[in-house]
Amino acid sequence: MKIRHIFILAISAAFLAACNFTLAADVTPPPNYVPPTPAPTLGPLYPASAPDIANGKIIYTEKCAPCHGGTGLGDGPDGKQLPVTVAALGLPETASTASPAKWYTTVTQGNLDRFMPPFVSLNEQERWDVVAYALTLHVTEKDLKRGQELYENFCVDCPAEIFRDQKRMASISNMELAQLLHDGTSDFPALESKMTEGGFTELAAYIRTLTFAPPPAPVVDSATETPIAAVAGAGTPSAEATPLDGTAQAQVTPEATIEPVAASAGKVNGLIENRTGQDFPSDLKITLRGFDHGADPAAGPQEILTLEGTVNADGTYAFVDVGIVENQIYLAEVEVDGLSYQTEFAVVPAETTELVLPDIIVYSTTEDYSALKIDSVQIYFDFATEDIAQIFAVYNISNPGDKTILIKMGDEQKVPFIAFPEGVEGLGYEAGQDSAAFVPTADGFAMPPSETAYSLIAFASIPKAKEIAISQPVLLSIGRLSLFLPEGVEAQGAALTDEGIQTLQTTNFHVYSASALKAGESLGFTLTGAPKDNTAVAPDVTQNKNLLIGIGGLGLVLILAGVWIYMRDNKKEEETEEEDDEFEDTESIMDAIIAIDELHRAGKLSDPAYKQRREELKDALKRKS
């Protein structure tokens, strides 16, 4: 087992980010943070020559696809063996907000927190090539075609040399570029009044291609590639079909082609329930997306179809003559008042010619979050690191009202109804794995009414002391608050009830509770003592399965927070200059880490031996980097 392909970025992502997304895309390191080793030289944060996406595709296939997957959904076979999630580069939510310079920096310097070494084996131009190709994974051929049409129709006065300026274009994301096109700059006029039907996202995607090197001249007698997105209502495309920009699955050779299942000319329909109190626009557009797992059920889904239609006056919509196949996955999405609503996934049953998608309910919106209810809060304290206590607060929130609540996070990226305890260093937020689906917005997120609770994790740290005084502000009323402390640590506070020692799996926690906390109050308590058994709470939270289960199956979301905090603290330690001759390079060390992870999961390696060896390997990885 050889891991050569740890690549680009660190963002938690679920399939299409429908049920889980990062609220704070990046956790900002604290002041005076110093990395453990000098970072490789970045050079200029723009390419010397136009990126060659054809070369970038070759590099991506060799070095990135095994972890990030051929379509960038984070589902590569090697990535599945890592103890952290792999960034889904092919999702618009991930790629549209990233500038080429940001991704180039990550490729160059690596991200050891996410088991990604710096790619020093690639020269600067090769790194720009692979970044440029990665930025095409979320764009379909249909998007590019529409973007080109918009450019030719509305951007005749836009000086093309601006969009070929590598320095300027490398510094902005596609989302920022779309906003610039909408608002205009001193260099070109605003297109807002001209492009009244929208399309700025597609226009930005096309303009991005102007920074790329021209494709090579076509080879005589070469096989013709067909964009999957262009095959609408014509059945399931063959496995060889691959868009020119590589936005869908990796090309399959004729020898590997599996005869596709025959498609039925079917119908996909559904209903949008309007609870806004106002009529929908007469030309409200809805998009249908189809996905197929392909021949390998363990592989990530690949988008095979994108169709756009119009919603009828009664909220119904229908797509006819759609080539549907058993076990394909479909969803529909619609944008109303700047919010993108999406159906749940629907799987095509056997022998069906009509697929009915789950309803979409569209609500009116408000910025008044006082209607939210915090049903419960669980706060976990980890004292395993030497001088820092780690804090994980899990908020379970419901929106029982009849309006979608818009949450603006502001420049400081703070959730306004959640307060970190006074005196702690707030690090960020994540959405819980079983949370109702948050709706991303330009400046935060939205929470539609939902029968399923929303789950948010706030993580922070505080310096250790013999006595740690905690003052937790209550911004919204809290039904019940629970503290989970390692056995040996006690809490004193007037509002707390001692629930005694409780065992979660094989780990004992001292549990305290408080009920009916009102908005405007502040819960105060003091922590004293020391963990009875320091091994009960693992220093590396990625392996703290007992804590993970205690939170209720939050999965890799908690792991991401713990990995960052723990490795940040360890980076402050003095570097050792001793050369580690046990391993040849960083890849060999990462192979060893994955191997002992597998042994531990299989029960062939005891917890103490596993933890000790894993720490040794991580230290060796830092020294080799």
Image (spheres, rainbow, N blue to C red):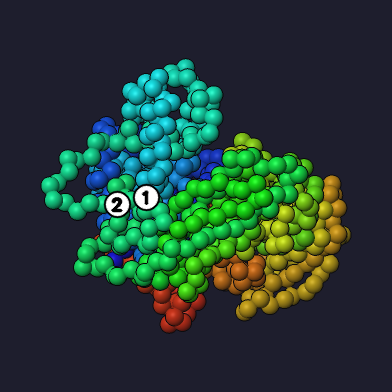
- Residue marked by disc 2: 226
Specify the label residue 78 is tagged with. none
User: Residue 289, position in %: x, y?
Assistant: 48, 55
User: Residue 477, position in %: x, y?
Assistant: 82, 53
User: Residue 49, position in %: x, y?
Assistant: 25, 33
Quarter assignment of residue 262:
bottom left
Q: Is residue 98 left or right of residue 376?
A: left
Q: Are marks 1 and 2 in contact (CB under 8 Å)?
A: yes
* Up/down of 52 relative to 327, above or below: above
- Residue marked by disc 1: 230
Q: Is residue 618 left or right of residue 63?
A: right
Q: Residue at x 70, y 49 (%)?
A: 274
Give the residue type at disc 2: Thr
User: Residue 336, position in %: x, y?
Assistant: 63, 43
Give the residue type at disc 1: Ala
Helix, strand or loop status at disc 1: helix
Instruction: Residue lying at the far top in this picture: please name it.
Output: 186
Choose between 180 and 377: the one closer to the eye: 180
* Up/down of 44 relative to 349, above or below: above
Q: Residues within 10 Å of mark 2 (few under 14, many from 20)?
A: some
Q: Is residue 309 left or right of residue 305?
A: right
Q: Residues within 10 Å of mark 1 (few under 14, many from 20)?
A: some
Q: Residue at x 29, y 70 (%)?
A: 258
Inspect this view and state whether residue 430 appears.
no
Choose between 471 and 145: the one closer to the eye: 145
Q: Residue at x 33, y 51 (%)?
A: 227
